[in-house]
Image (tube, rainbow, N blue to C red):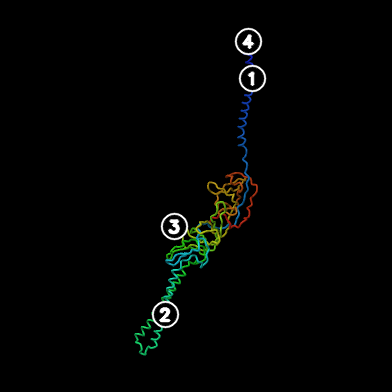
Amino acid sequence: HALHRDVGKMMLKHKLVYLAPACALLLTACGAKDDGTAAGASTPQTAASAPRAAMTVTVATPRQQSLPRQIAATGNIAAWQEASVGTDAAGLRLAEVRAHVGDVVTKGQVLASFDAAPVRQDEAQALAALAEAEATLAEAAGTAARARAVEGTGALSAQQIQQYLTAEKTARARVAAARAVVAAQAIRMRNTQVLAPDAGVISARSATVGQVVQPGAELFRLVRRGRLEWRAEVTAGQLAQIEPGQSATIELPGPPDAPAPQIQGTVRQLAPTVDAKTRYAIVYVDLPTGTPARAGMFARGHVALGQDQALTVPQPAVVMRDGFAHVLVLGEGERVRLTRVETGRIANGQIEITRGLDASARVAVQGAAFLNDGDVVRVVEDSKPKQPSAPASQAQTATK
């Protein structure tokens, strides 16, 4: 028992030796945790007491700039004039079609031709009838001449003389009728060929070889002289600002991954009335030939009205807040004030301010999108507006 007691005391002593360092380590860790908590608690207070850093911005002063006045519109592209090409040849078979959709034709060019054999036969019969009538007239004229020679001698009665004279007149009338038939057959012969009434482009074709066409049926449709026009729709108020001769820029549909092609046109005339249903009027704009425009296209564009002076600021100075346009005006103490404005046209990186901004104000430009009302800023340099590299007529958008 004494041996077991001594062994137990020795084991307890060894355990205490091993537990002492562990306890010391645990106490040290607890102390470190308390110190960290204290340090962490003091950090927010230090940050809260530190002043907020001022954002670096550039500023600019509004300037007067000449901007184009334009009216935006949309409309369809259509043919200036179309010609319906048909024929008066009745009951004839279409033997040949020479023109197709897209062909450029000249005035008088043969577009199609009919089988002329029946017309030749009728013309020959008319010529024969004319020859017969002329022979009859020659005989009647000779008889009438002899009757006139013996008139008053009593050789022939007055009744017989009158009959001979009447027969001559009848023969002359029959010759005139026969000649009219010959002329009609000549017209039919000419109608066996369908001719273009004017130069232009074939836009539609219904003629088919072997077809028997009725009189007046349309065989071709022709865009006269290949001229197209843009029929822009504008309101009654806008119509009063447009005059013939003004230039227009039309943006044509193009590939989705490429800039839309643009062409220049000229206002030819204005519609005399306004549509009672849509309340829009039509402005007819002539388009140059040889453009990629096609009849039936829908296009948007604008009509140039001229230029006027406008108060502008750099486009980055205008920020949108709550759906409205604002600028940040630099005030006392380098503090900005959020000011609501109304904007207008945009051209060459400048945007027009129509209301809400004084011409002598200084507005934040670079960095304005990250500022709020009352923020303190640090101005590094005044941003100088760049001179436009393109004419002011090349405005991106315009509102009037």
Residues 252 and 172: in front is 172
* Amino acid under disc 3: Lys
* Amino acid under disc 1: Tyr
| Residue under label 1 | 18
Residue at image position (64%, 19%) is 18
| Residue under label 2 | 135
Mark 1–mark 3 distance (CA, rounded to whole Å): 101 Å
Badge 4: residue crowd in 10 Å (few <14, some 14–19, many ≥20): few
Nearest to viewer (mark 2 / mark 1): 2
1 and 3 marks in contact (CB < 8 Å):
no
**Does 327 sit left or right of 214 as displayed?**
right
Percent position of residue 97, x then y: 49, 63
Sequence order check, earlier mark of 4 and 1: 4
Placement of 399 over or under 127, stated as above or below:
above
| Residue under label 3 | 277
* Amino acid under disc 4: Leu
Sequence order check, earlier mark of 2 and 1: 1
Q: On the image, which quarter does residue 38 sit in?
A: top right
Mark 2–mark 1 distance (CA, rounded to whole Å): 157 Å
Residue at image position (63%, 10%) is 3
Residues 109 and 31: in front is 109
